[in-house]
Amino acid sequence: MPDNAPTTPTTPTTPPTRGSLAFLTGPGGDLLNAAANVNLLRQLWLDRTLISGDDLGPGDPGDFDNGAWHSSCHLLGAGGVRKAADGRVLWLEVSHYGPRDEYYASVTAREKAGPRTVPLDSAEGRDLVEGSSLLGFVEGNSTGRTSARQVFDPPDRFNLWRRQDCDQPAASDLDGGKVWEHWCTLRDLRPSNRLALSVLTAYVSLVAALGDRFAATVARGRRDYGHPKQLAAMAHAGFVGPDAANWDVTPTAVPAAAEKLLLEADPARALEAVEKLDWAGGPRYYMFARKLASWSPAKAVKADLKAFAAAGRPAARPAP
């Protein structure tokens, strides 16, 4: 085009928004990977007008002064699986970067030399996910290893919770694993907490890559601890869509061989595990067998959403 050719000014398009907090979404309803959504998620999980008291879930005194709702640690511990355009299985999760003690969204793929993990938001990560299709999701481990190894949290960092205490042997039945790891990291969501910001940023990126059903499905893994109301609040605020919250899915038990690998909380071992799973007829959701009875079926979720809406919930208040 010649330098003096007339140009038509373009008007920036505003992404669609959803819910009382106006989360930014894409045309298909999936959450956008945007800084605004990171701030809104922090605001939502610190909100005490939508969720308060016993509905926050169990915890010690002070755990919810600056901390997220109980379901949040389960959401952060989970991961998802996509099939790359070249047919490879991809494992997506929130991973830990040891040198800086920060968290990031990652994608792991098998290459000739073995599994390789890269940041989801890197050029290589985006190339892997481009053109891929969703296979499903996997519950986070609440026993076994954590993703953060050789960290030494002081007792005052996360209201007396320490990540090193949650790093258990893979064969242990004691509470631990990535779920308990993120129970720690999510006890202080104040803007001054650099680590918490990395956690929230990583999670929004992961949710954007795995689609609207991801967070809602994982939240349905418990009928106790306040999770049903917390899921309804997330739908009310717009973090998840109502259709995603109650889609018709029944979880499948993680086979024992895959469970042993997932309890290692290592992305390479997780990739090995999900490569062994049956993803036919997906998207599918895999849960650890010991908690299958806690699942919220679609009928129960629909009733939860209706009851929450009938209570006339206000819009969430801005976080301090």
Image (cartoon, rainbow, N blue to C red):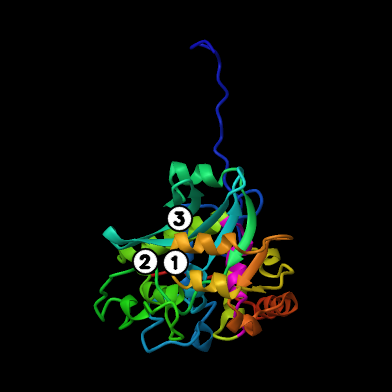
Q: Which mark is drawn over residue 106?
A: 3
Q: Is residue 226 visible?
A: yes
Q: Earlier in the sequence, mark 1 or mark 2?
A: 1
- Which amino acid, mark 2? Ala
Q: Is residue 250 above or below residue 111?
A: below
> Marks 1 and 3, Cα distance to the nearest angstrom?
21 Å
> Marks 1 and 2, Cα distance to the nearest angstrom?
9 Å
Nearer to me, 161 or 285: 285
Say if the magenta span includes residue 286. no
| Circle 1 crowding by C-alpha within 10 Å: few under 14, some 14–19, many from 20 | many
Q: Earlier in the sequence, mark 2 or mark 3?
A: 3
Q: In the image, is 302 to the left or to the right of 30?
A: right
The residue at which mark 2 appears reads as 196
**SS category of the residue bearing label 2:** helix
- Which amino acid, mark 3? Ser
- The x, y position of residue 311, in whole percent, is 65, 81
- The x, y position of residue 15, in whole percent, is 58, 48
Callout 2 touching callout 3 (CB < 8 Å): no
Magenta-tinted stretch = 210-223
Pair 2/3: label in front: 3
Callout 1 touching callout 2 (CB < 8 Å): yes
Quarter of the image for residue 7 reads top right
Image point (39%, 72%), residue name: 146
- The x, y position of residue 292, in whole percent, is 64, 81
- The x, y position of residue 35, in whole percent, is 44, 53
Q: Is residue 270 above or below residue 48?
A: above
| Circle 2 crowding by C-alpha within 10 Å: few under 14, some 14–19, many from 20 | many
The residue at which mark 1 appears reads as 42
Query: From the image, which quarter does the N terminus lie in?
Result: top right
- Which amino acid, mark 1? Arg
Q: In the image, is 303 to the left or to the right of 123?
A: right
Say if the magenta span includes residue 222. yes
